[in-house]
Image (cartoon, rainbow, N blue to C red):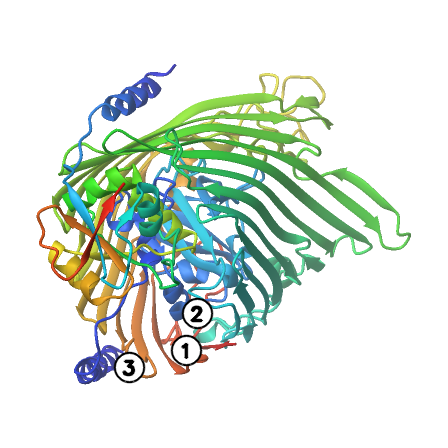
Amino acid sequence: MKRVLMAVVGLLIVASNALAQTQPADTSKLSEDLIYSVNRTPEHTFDTARAVEVITIDDLWRKSGLTLADVLVDEAGFIKYRTNQYSSAGLLRGLIGKQVLILIDGVKVNNALYGDTPNMDLIDLSQVERIEIVRGVVSVLGTDSLGGAINIITRKGPAGDTTFGGTLTTRYSSAANAFASPVQVYGQTDKLRYTASANYLRAGETEGGKDAGVQHFTDFSQKAGNLNLQYLVSADKTLNFSYHGTQLDDAKAFSNLVNKTSIHNVQTPNRFQLGSLSYQDLTSRGWSDSLKVTAFWNQQETGSEDVRTNTPNTQTNVLDHDRMLGLNLELGSFLGKSHHLVYGVDYSQDSIESWTRDTNLTTDVATYRRGRYTNDAKYTSLGVYMQDHFSISKWVTASAGLRYGSFKAEGSETLPVLGAVSLDSTKSDATGSLNVIVHVTPTLNVIGNAMRGFRAPNLQDISRFSLSSSTIEMPATRAEAEQVTSYEAGVKYENRFLSGSAFYFINDLSNLLIVSDSTYKGLRFIDNNGNGKKDAGEPNVRENLNIGSAQIKGWEANFRIRPTDWLQFWGNMTHSTASTDDVLQAALVQRVPPPFGSAGIRFSANHASHQPWAEVAGTFTGAYDIAGTQLSPSFTEYKVRGGATVTDRFRVMAGIENLTDQKYLSRFTTVYWPGRRFVVSTEFRF
Amino acid sequence: MKLSNRIAIALFTGTVLVAGAAQAAPYKIVVNNSVSVSSLSKKAASDLFLKKTTKWEGGAAVLPVDQLDSSSTREGFSKSVHGKTAAAVKSYWNQQIFSGREVPPVEKKSDAEVLSFVRSTPGAIGYVSDSASTDGVRVVTIN
């Protein structure tokens, strides 16, 4: 394997040396160097105090992933958990799911039912122009970013003077005979810019590496539609409407079918829709240099349709429906010599529908019962924030952010055993950050950050209820906010030949919510007969309690070396550890990933006639060993990719991934990682 | 209020009170000799450099050129013509780039580079320090 890699690298260097004689310097795209998500205003990545990654539209093409999580792997600090064949969740700094804030164009995707493994693959990749990852607490974006934030920036209108055009793209992966076909049209007039896209993804049964073979019931399909309209009111004023909708179809509960506990089990509905209407005004008014108002609608539905083998004549449908409506008002002001203030108000309200329906397949009679969460519950959040970015001297710049959030849960119901239960509660707290950059030289920044964050319990935390003969999980009406205090130190270096960053972080987490043994009326079980002793059939009491505390610390480093315009080496490494004194929190520390990283070499002749490029990359994930038990083995995946612009209107990329056909079962999944696979993408512009 | 909240607020308000920035320097606006304009209002000049006005009278394209962020001439020009700091103007452009609407003018490293660009580019407009020689270009006064 090493000899193959060395031969490929050697060929790349020889080829790139030959081409270098004729190629002029590369030109950069201005927006690729900007990041919005740190200070809620676009700024250069090198000038931000935070540990960030930006995945550009060129990166998206080279990676040619079928899903969002596919293109996030290989990034420093980010690890993908493929929770099943159709769903992935991202982990940042040891935290996952509802502790990582996901946004689309700054509008939050996280809703009141976000759990530990929300499906980020429901965000359609064909609409994405760039992805910003900020590791650590980001106070101005929201209170859910304990581990970090991922902001997906979508496409808006065509570049340059193009009045009308579009792309027809195909993506294929042989591992599951997966095929996606995004179609996009865009155009503009004097006053209107638009982009619309549709995507259909069909994946067959995934074939794992080596002897894992074809994994039955892992096939699924997904369809998506996106629209962005920009009305150019004037040079400074823009009215923007966008809609993104994705629906997952035919996804099955893989393990239920393989283990034959279900005759039929489809994860339906599985839909995500996000719409927003925003007005931006960059007119200078003395007291304000920018104003933006955004109204949004976020609707997510998840459910299942299940016929169990032990009740073959009963079909059970489960539905969880969350509809969020929100409003954001934001202003930006320049004050004094260097202060740039960004401040605003966020408001949102989630309305929940949740039920379970049993249908007698013989009589077609349906009966409804409680769903996973409290039906008709509401969750309201109000946030006020301010961020100031300023220069202290020629050598030192800083930013300070503060956000106050208030979260109100409302809902009530009558539950078996427990009787009347009310969710009514209000939690409020502050999150903030202070970031300082010392500009040691024009190419070297030394950074120190201190952050404090919290995440108020959402309805997924507090309204869960389950009852069996052995256990009852009570709604967590006593739950309080989870807390984190975080410190970071880092360096960033950037010149024409070398760029990179390295950060060391310490996250002290407290009040973490963990489902554990609890009490009801002073007893650790439900005392049905009132005799004060635990008898057969009296379930133990469980509850989501704020008993978790842990320290997660580690470092992340990345680099990119460009010895010439047509050759670059890159790599990154992440290492984190978690410690806790409490055995109850084993589940928490087990989520913290082993060391992982990636490295590669890329040759790209951007100014040659067909702009050929090729790369070899490797991704490494260490073994998950907890107290001597291996939860998953180490895994190294090699990839070879290449592509070219065949004509002005047609380009192609192809590659082989998991080159050595490794068999790998990552944590939190029962589906083997795809084996050696051939991938190919084509794009035709019209 | 919790102690940690108080500390956060104290840090925030404390750091807000200390700040500094680059010195501003006098400037003069220059245009290519093909441009017949001899004077401009501040508003008209600002619109030209912010690409709100994209054509000269007569229809030729306006090609503005900026100096680097770190230039004291740019700071002086920005405050005088745009009424805001160079950092504020940079932020304006970043927002325009980010929303895909417009890109900022090209930037040149020195008076000499600005003058060379303006001299050789029909429709060009730029600014240089007050002391720069302006041979081969037309100087425009601000009303």
Q: Which quadrant is the N terminus of chain A positioned in? A: bottom left
Relative vertical location of residue A640 with respect to residue A283 in this rendering, above or below: below
Q: Which chain does the numbered disc 3 sit on? A: A
**Residue A658 pos. (x, y %):** 39, 72
Q: How many residues crowd mark 3 within 10 Å: few (<14), some (14–19), many (20+)?
A: some
Q: How many residues crowd mark 2 within 10 Å: few (<14), some (14–19), many (20+)?
A: many
Q: Which chain does the numbered disc 1 sit on? A: A
**Residue A542 pos. (x, y %):** 57, 30
Q: Amino acid at mark 3?
A: Ala
Residue depicted at x 64% and y 17%: A532
Q: Amino acid at mark 2?
A: Ser
Co-location on one chain, circles 3 and 2: yes
Q: How many residues crowd mark 1 within 10 Å: few (<14), some (14–19), many (20+)?
A: many
A404 or B73, nearer to the observer? B73
* Image quadrant where residue A334 sits: top left
Do the residues under discs 2 and 1 have CB atoms within 8 angstroms? yes
Q: Earlier in the sequence, mark 3 or mark 2?
A: 2
Residue identified by numbered label 1: A653
Q: Mark 3 or 2, which is nearer the eye?
A: 3
* Image quadrant where residue A452 sits: top left
Q: Earlier in the sequence, mark 2 or mark 1?
A: 2
Residue identified by numbered label 2: A64
Q: Which chain does the numbered disc 2 sit on? A: A
Relative vertical location of residue A28 with respect to residue B45 in this rendering, above or below: below
Residue identified by numbered label 3: A608
